[in-house]
Structures are given as C-alpha cells and as structure tokens.
Amino acid sequence: MSNHSNGREFRRLFPVALDKDGGKGNRLRRQPAASMPSPSMAASCPRPHKLTPVALHHQSVAMAAAFAAFRRFGDLLTRRLTASTNLGLSLRPMSASAQEEASEASPEEAPGHSYESLRVTAAQKHVLHVQLNRPEKRNAMNKAFWREMVVCFNKIAEDSDCRVVVISGAGKMFTSGIDLMDMASELLQPTGDDTARISWHLHSLITRYQETFSVIEKCPKPVIAAIHGGCIGGGVDLITACDIRYSTRDSFFQVKEVDIGLAADVGTLQRLPKVIGNQSLVNELAYTARKMMADEALESGLVSRLFPDKETMLDAAFTLAAEISSKSPVAVQSTKINLIYSRDHSVTESLNYMKSWNMSMLQTEDVMKSVQAAIEKKALKTVTFSKL
C-alpha cells in the first residue's frame, strides 16, 4: 500500500473531531488525523469545567467514534501486515502442523563429522549434539560405532569453537548396548595361533574398545548425556564417562554383561562406583543385570534430573549447555580436567596438581573479563572469550 493511499485510508477512518462553539452547541468538523487524541491522551487530559448535558453528549459520541475508528484502523493494519508481501514474508501465525514440521527439521551435519553410526550437528553456538544414530537397531553399538566415537571426540577435543557436547540417542531408546550380531566374529572368534597370541589380540581389541568411552572423559569439553528409554550394557559404560546425566522418567539402566557371559570391561565397573558412591548397589546391579528404573537412578545419583519426555529433557540439556558455554572456556575446561584428576588421586596430590595448573591458567584475560562483567552486572553471555 503506497503512502498516498495510506493517507486516504487514514482520513476515511478518522473523519471527525470535536470543535466547541462557546457553549451554544457543538459543531463537528474534519481535522487532520494527527490532532486526534489517543486513548491514553484522552484519559490524561483535564475535563472542561463547564459542559452542558448537550455538549457532554456530543463529546461522548465523538470520542466513541474516534475509538471505533482506531479499532477499524488497527484491524486494517493487521490484515495488511499479515498478508504476504512482495518479499515473500508472512507474519501469520504458523499452523500446528507447520510448527511440528519446523520443530522436526534437523540441522545439517557439523563440518568434518560424517559417520555411519553417529550424527553430529551444531545445535547452537559453541554446542555440538552427538546422536547415536541407528534407531532401526535401537542404537546398538556395531563395529563402526566403536571406531567412530574415538574419531568424533578426538575432533571435538581439538575444535576451538566447541565448548559443550550433548549426547542423545535417536529413535525410541538411548541404546540397547553392544550389537552382538555385528561384533560376534571379533569377540567369539579372535585371531591367533595359540592361547598367548589370541590373548594378545584380545588385549589389543579391548584396549581399543575402552578408548571408545575414555575419549569422552579425556575430552576437555563438558559432555551432557540426555538419556531416554533403555540404557543397556555399553550404554552404562558410555554415560558414566560423561560429566552430567539427565534422563526421562521412562528410562531404565542395566549392567547387562553378566547375562551374556562376561564381565563389563570398558568402564562401568571402574566408573559407576565413583559416580554413585554406593559399592553395595553397584555390586547388586553388576551381579544380577537387573533394571535400575529412573527414580532409583535419580535417588542414587546416577542422573541429576528427570523429565517427563524426551523433548523436555533435550530442551533442558541444551539450556544447560548454553549456560556452560557462556563461561570462560579456560575456566570450564580447567575445572573438568581437575575434577577428573581429583577423583583418581588423594587430596594432597590433587592440590599440588591444581597449583601447577593454575600458575599458568590464572594469567588468562578471561579472569579480568569475567570480573569486569560481574562488577558491571552484565551476563557472561555478553562477554566475548577467545577461542580455546
């Protein structure tokens, strides 16, 4: 709509204004639209000291006409704005189906991360989302998975743009654990001419499998596990190597290895006791392979929060990731490294390590930037920290 036609439309909608005539009756005449009072102005203007009933009646009629004109103009403006323009833009509210399609639209894969068993996307600034991506197989861990997790997290560790990682599972559950059909040949028919050589080969194989989850712990970026449905066998090994664990209320956890004739050998028996701090409970879970339901997982400390569904959980996980990513990467990554060191060493050893660490890390500009933001009462997300 042109400016000229806008003017005509405005004058058509605002035809009258009140013009008093010395108390001998009020005449209505056309005035420029700019002279019309707004509702707020009308409310704040002082009332005339002397108004006859006739004058008061005419004033009420005129004000009612003005308010009605405002409403008509507002409706017209809304219709014009919400119509499609020649730029192809639309301000109409999205339909429910359109909103659902938009929410399901997946972001593109992060550059340099193309895998068979995983999907890595840039969820938001400084945050990567790593999905176990074999939903048709309940995210069972095949040969590609054990190899690709190492490649993926080694890249993430060196990615100066990434500050936090969220791990989740595509489909109906987090993971069903090891893919026995795919892994059977390596586990049940190892190569070697005699016991010594077979053992040597298995030692090398298990070392590689252990690295699949140790690489998560070694990665200096905090890793948040977002668990829904089943987290079985190798899934427990995976999440105990993560820094923070959220889950849905329908989740359950199983140290499943004894049911397939072996002892868990890639991290659960070593990390789970330190995660939940209850050796009796760990022994019970590991000896029986029973399910630990979500409420018990929360109570024991395996997870820190429960959510009603996967969508709500992921929203919370990414909100947490955004909060962590707003902090100094020097501070956050130093904290993770020292927390893990302290877990495995005495207090004295850990304090000595901390001294050696911070004698260099305290010289970062991030300290001054963070302190200045606190003094000025600014959120850290407004501060630009250098890449690390």
Image: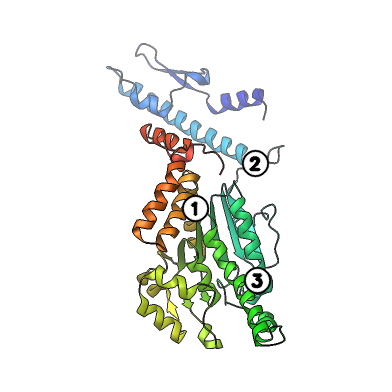
Q: Residue furthest top?
A: 22
Q: Residue 178, relative to residue 9: is it above or below?
A: below
Q: Which residue is mark 2?
A: 83
Query: Which residue is nearer to you in this view: 202 or 33?
Result: 202
Query: Which residue is nearer to you in this view: 20 or 163?
Result: 163
Q: Find residue 6 and report its horizontal and vertical position in percent.
A: 62, 26
Q: Residue 289, relative to residue 386: is it above or below?
A: below
Tell me how far mark 2 sits from mark 1, CA to CA: 38 Å
| Quadrant of the frame with the C terminus | top right
Q: Which residue is mark 3?
A: 134
Q: Find residue 134 and report its horizontal and vertical position in percent.
A: 65, 71
Q: Earlier in the sequence, mark 1 or mark 3?
A: 3
**Residue at 62% of width from left, 70% of height from top?**
208
Q: Residues within 10 Å of mark 2 (few under 14, many from 20)?
A: some
Amino acid carrying label 1: it is Ala
Q: Is residue 145 left or right of residue 362?
A: right
Q: Residue 109: which quarter of the image?
A: bottom right
Residue at disc 3, secondary structure: loop
Q: Residues within 10 Å of mark 3 (few under 14, many from 20)?
A: many
Q: Earlier in the sequence, mark 3 or mark 2?
A: 2
Query: Which residue is nearer to you in this view: 306 or 81?
Result: 306
Q: Residues within 10 Å of mark 1 (few under 14, many from 20)?
A: many
Residue at disc 1, secondary structure: helix
Q: Which residue is mark 1?
A: 321
**Residue at 57% of width from left, 24% of height from top?**
11
Residue at disc 2, secondary structure: loop
Q: Pointers 2 and 1 in contact (CB under 8 A)?
A: no
Q: Find residue 262 and report its horizontal and vertical position in percent.
A: 54, 85
Amino acid carrying label 2: it is Ala
Q: Nearer the viewer, mark 3 or mark 2?
A: 3
Q: Earlier in the sequence, mark 2 or mark 1?
A: 2
Q: Find residue 372 and report its horizontal and vertical position in percent.
A: 40, 32
